[in-house]
Amino acid sequence: MKPNFLAILAALTMNGPHVANAQSTDECFPNLIKFDVCSEAKKMQAEMAKSLPMNVSRNMTLMTAAAFGPRLGMNVVWHMTGSTLNNMLVDNGMTHDQLVSRMEQSTRKIVCGQKQPSAAFVRLGGQIQYIYITDDYIPIASPTITQCPPEP
């Protein structure tokens, strides 16, 4: 039986103080203009859900998206097994920690890229988390972007 992707997403994203009080004023309005990032996370999730699953590359598919307070979490499946991933790391002389670091950098570039709506969302206090897993449900990384550099 395959695990439910939403259950995996919920389990991996439900950490931190926002879970106990997902609609607190402090976390939903963490900006000076009183922009509701919790409401925006829900809107972003609803819009994304219309297009899921979505191939984001030849080897990755965005499967699910969920909103938890100010956080938009997305579950991305890498189309390889955990053992294939481990073999790839060995073949390239890379550790898992190095892979995670590179994935965090790449995710930050995607989220915080110029003219990305996600960058504005994060700058206003929202959070975006990508949860990467293999085809056989092995967690790879789950970077959470909570800050983007100011616009130039």
Image: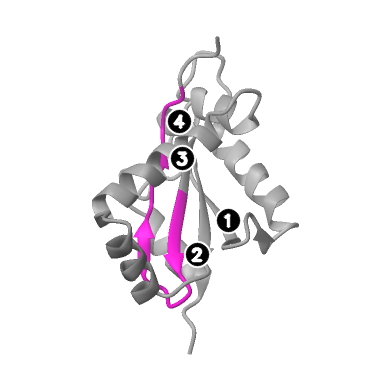
SS of the residue under disc 1: strand
Quarter of the image for residue 94 reads: bottom left
Residue closer to the observer: 95 or 30: 95
Picture colour scheme: one colour
Q: CA distance from mark 3 to mark 1?
A: 19 Å
Asked whether disc 1 touches disc 2, contact meaning CB atoms under 8 Å apart, the reply is no
Which label's residue is closer to the chain start, 3 or 2?
Answer: 2
Q: CA distance from mark 1 to mark 4?
A: 23 Å
Asked whether disc 4 touches disc 3, contact meaning CB atoms under 8 Å apart, the reply is no
SS of the residue under disc 2: strand
Name the residue tied to disc 2. Answer: 78
Give the image location of residue 35, x and y in percent.
58, 24
Residue 145 on the magenta span: yes
The residue at the far top in this view is 152
Asked whether disc 4 touches disc 2, contact meaning CB atoms under 8 Å apart, the reply is no
Name the residue tied to disc 4. Answer: 25
Q: Amino acid at mark 1?
A: Ala
Residue 97 in view (yes/no)? yes
Residue at the image point whose x is 45% and y is 46% from the top: 129
- Of circles 4 and 3, which is in front? 3
Tell me the magenta residue range: 130-148
Name the residue tied to disc 3. Answer: 106
Circle number at residue 65: 1
